[in-house]
């Protein structure tokens, strides 16, 4: 493989580029028990940090 082949290879795309930022926002909202912010978050983020929409911990 030559140098030009490597340069032409497509870059891997992140699945969700904002996911880590969104998770940090979600975690901060959980700590502050900010119900309005928690209600605005998508369900998959709430599942990831393990809380319900009203800020309580999910029991699995």
Image (cartoon, helix red, strand yellow):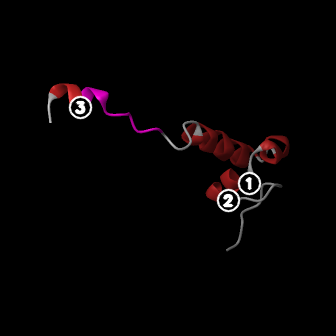
Q: x, y percentage for residue 8? A: 30, 28
Q: Is residue 32 above or below residue 48?
A: above
Q: Answer yes or no: do the residues labelled 1 and 2 have beta carbons within 8 Å?
A: yes
Magenta highlight on residue 53 = no
- Say whether residue 12 is left or right of residue 39: left
Q: Is residue 51 above or below residue 42?
A: below
Q: Quadrant of the C terminus?
A: bottom right
Badge 1 element: helix
Residue at mark 1? 43
Q: x, y percentage for residue 38? A: 78, 46
User: Counting other residues with Cα less than 10 Å from the Cα at mark 1, is it few (<14), some (14-19), or many (20 or more)?
Assistant: few
Whole-Å distance between the Cαs marked 1 and 2? 6 Å
Residue at mark 3? 6
Q: Nearer the viewer, residue 28 or 39?
A: 39
Residue at mark 2? 47
Q: Answer yes or no: do the residues labelled 1 and 3 have beta carbons within 8 Å?
A: no
Q: Nearer the viewer, residue 33 or 7?
A: 7
Q: Quadrant of residue 44?
A: bottom right
Mark 1 / mark 3, whichever is N-terminal = 3
Q: Residue at x 38, y 34 (%)?
A: 11
Q: Quadrant of residue 18?
A: top right
Residue 21's mark? none
Q: x, y percentage for residue 59? A: 70, 72
User: Counting other residues with Cα less than 10 Å from the Cα at mark 2, is it few (<14), some (14-19), or many (20 or more)?
Assistant: few
Q: Is residue 10 above or below residue 39?
A: above
- Say whether residue 35 is left or right of residue 21: right
Whole-Å distance between the Cαs marked 1 and 3? 39 Å
Q: Which residues are magenta?
A: 6-13
The overriding secondary structure of the stretch rendered in magenta is loop
Q: Which tag is nearer the camera, tag 1 or tag 3? A: 3
Q: Quadrant of the N terminus?
A: top left
């Amino acid at each position: 493989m030559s140098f030009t082949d490597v340069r032409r290879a497509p870059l891997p795309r992140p699945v969700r580029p904002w996911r880590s930022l969104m998770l940090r926002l979600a975690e901060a909202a959980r700590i502050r028990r900010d119900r309005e912010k928690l209600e605005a978050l998508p369900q998959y983020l709430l599942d990831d940090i393990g809380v319900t929409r009203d800020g309580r911990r999910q029991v699995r």
